[in-house]
Amino acid sequence: MTDTHILSPVRVSSPGILDGDVIPHRFTADGGNFSPALSWSHLPEGTVSVAITCDDPIGPRGRPFYLWAVYNIPPFLSEIPEGLSKVPLCPEVPGASQGLNDKGVVGYDGPAPPKGHSRAYEFLVHALDTVLDLPPGPRVEDVHRAMEGHVLGIGRLVGTFSGR
């Protein structure tokens, strides 16, 4: 997803994943498959909601493979907890909804690259100038489409994982 204007940098961190490091087993599909806790700061002025996506930018078919989308997070929040429920309306983050990932599951479904392959996964925090007009449980592609033209800032946390 790209916008034509300059985006403000959002700072993103996680107590469970260090930027550029290996993703711990509990956040992978063959581990506990828990979504990681994430926190952010430096949202740009005018932020109305926050969306988080996670993807393998290369993916198995040479296009991004989406593992997660949670959107309409209120802008006064600066973090989400680990292990969000895999339901469209996440009770852990009032007001937020989750989308259907590329594995056909609502919520987070962690990395599971093919055996012997290593991948980098991006956790992106998007500061938006609107609340997305989507029902709970849309496809991640629909979330990305709805965000087009509304992204004020973006932050990135990257973790790697190798298939076993």
Image (cartoon, rainbow, N blue to C red):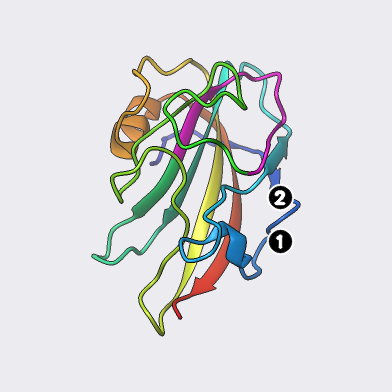
Span of residues in magenta:
69-82
Instruction: Reply yes or no: does residue 72 show up in magenta.
Output: yes
On the rendered image, what quadrant is the N terminus found in?
top left
Of residues 7 and 23, the one nearer the viewer is: 23
Question: Does residue 128 sit above or below 38 in this rendering?
Answer: above
**Amino acid type of the residue that numbered disc 2 sits on in the rendered structure:** Ser
Marks 2 and 1, how far apart at CA: 7 Å
- Local crowd size for mark 1, using a 10 Å CA cut-off: few (<14), some (14–19), many (≥20): some
Measuring from the top left, give residue 93's x and y in whole percent: 61, 25
**Whether residue 100 is situated above or below residue 152 in the rendered picture:** below
Q: Which residue is mark 1?
A: 18
How many residues crowd around disc 2 within 10 Å: few (fewer than 14), some, or many (20 or more)?
some
Residue under pointer 2: 14
Q: Residue at x 44, y 39 (%)?
A: 107
Is residue 157 shown in magenta? no
Residue type of the residue flagged with mark 1: Leu
Locate residue 161, reporting x and y percent: 52, 71
Mark 1 element type: loop
* Looking at the image, residue 110 lies above or below residue 81: below
Q: Quadrant of residue 75?
A: top right
What label sits on residue 1 in the rendered view?
none
The answer to the question of whether label 2 and label 1 lie on touching residues, with beta carbons closer than 8 A, is yes
Looking at the rendered structure, the secondary structure element under dot 2 is: loop
Q: Residue at x 42, y 35 (%)?
A: 3
